[in-house]
Amino acid sequence: MPIPTRASLTTRFTGAALLAACTLALAAPDESTLGRDAGYPVAPRLSRIHDDRFIVGSFSALDTLSPHCLLAPSPHPLALPVAPSAPEFSYRLAGQSFTLGDYMDRQRATGVLVLKDGQVVAERYNYRRRPDMRMLSNSMAKTLVALAIGQALDDGAIHSLADTAARYVPELKGTLYGETQLANLLRMASGARYVEDYTDHDDRAAFNAIVRREGVVAAARSVTDRADPQGARFNYAGAQTEVLGLVLRAATGHSLCEFVDERLWQPIGAESAASYLLHPHDQVEEAAGGFNATLRDYARLGWMLANDGRVGDRQVVPRDWLLAMTDAARHPPQFRPGTMDSHGSHYFGYGYQVWLMPGTHRRFVLLGVYGQAIYVDPELKLVMVHLAVGADARGDASGAHMGLERDALWRGVVARYGAW
């Protein structure tokens, strides 16, 4: 008798039984290397969280290693019912066909959840991860900052995206980031000469070292060289999101943790507490990537985005702001899919702290290093959450090509319900 695949096992379950089956795992990639025999341990300190034997445990428990703040769950969590039957998702890659089960066997995904019309149609975990574990967002957190900026703009706490950061953070007056308009910070278009390639000595590493010693304001003041006029060119740099976090704090009088908790996390109907890591020197939130939440609550965030800011009968984020963030037609041509240059690729575009996808209608994705992603298709009311411990930050240098295969999986999910 042939050994059953994860996909064939899952098809035997429907409804509530699917959730019981979703944690069933056969052999995920690199289990032994990633610490299976030690129970996937958490790193002894932050500097080692990316070591192979610690990355699984650490990405699911990072707020145990760092100062953090907690965001409370909603008193009325949004129900995520399980679909009565589980569709079989398939995708094509390099001339071959694969299933979601194959994907979980091939890539270092810790959890994948697909939501269609508000129902869970697939939920899978690897490496003994569980639905109650808070998983690291990495740069998916940047989109939370943009959502909060839009709410503050709607409140009148932020007056205009044409304002410079220094209008709200006087300590940045006369600096490169301080004299950059908020719209250009949101588009990653400050013009700063800044390399973020996740090597040990890139500008990101230098910026973060100053943050640890002196705080975010000091680190922002250290960026002084402008390579391009602001607004002219996309250049991804998390430092710009950290500045936006300072702007939000100053404009609203609330920390990012407080604001996101009250205005986003509870209103989306989050079931579990979330957390923000805090920078050790100034206790300011890690706006660019320090958010942690469960797989299902990331799906609830995606569901709000798929409904253009609405959850039930409540408009959580202004609809026009969601369109401003995610509609490529609302951004200059140099930021649209097919024309924007991101490390030599023209596949994605970039809106306000979110990646824009090509295709026949509006689709977008929140992305974080090591494989984190929330894909959103508002027209199809379709969301896919993908959490991972990729073999390298960008996802492709190791040869695993996680980004490429994850995109193929998303296209396969879309094809199950519509056309690209």
Image: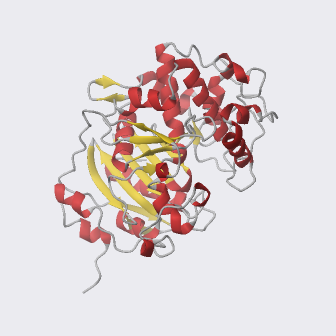
Snapshot quadrant of residue 289: top right
| Residue sitting nearer the eye, 27 or 136 | 136
Which residue is pictured at 28% across the width and 84% down the height? 2
**42 w.r.t. 311: above or below:** below
Asked if one can make out residue 77 in the rendered structure from this viewpoint, the answer is: yes
Which residue is pictured at 48% across the width and 61% down the height? 42
71 sits left or right of 148 in the view: left
**Quadrant for the N terminus in the image:** bottom left
118 sits left or right of 111 in the view: left
Point out residue 383 in the picture as x, y percentages from the top left corner.
37, 45
Give the residue at the far bottom of this rendering: 1
**11 w.r.t. 207: above or below:** below
Point out residue 62 in the picture as x, y percentages from the top left corner.
49, 52
| Residue sitting nearer the eye, 378 or 161 | 161
**311 w.r.t. 366: above or below:** above
| Residue sitting nearer the eye, 31 or 361 | 31
Point out residue 51 in the picture as x, y percentages from the top left corner.
58, 65
How many callouts does the rendering have?
Answer: 0
Which residue is pictured at 70% across the width and 28% down the height? 231
27 sits left or right of 17 in the view: right
Question: How is the model colour-coded?
Answer: secondary structure
Point out residue 388 in the picture as x, y percentages from the top left corner.
47, 58
Asked if one can make out residue 179 in the rendered structure from this viewpoint, the answer is: no
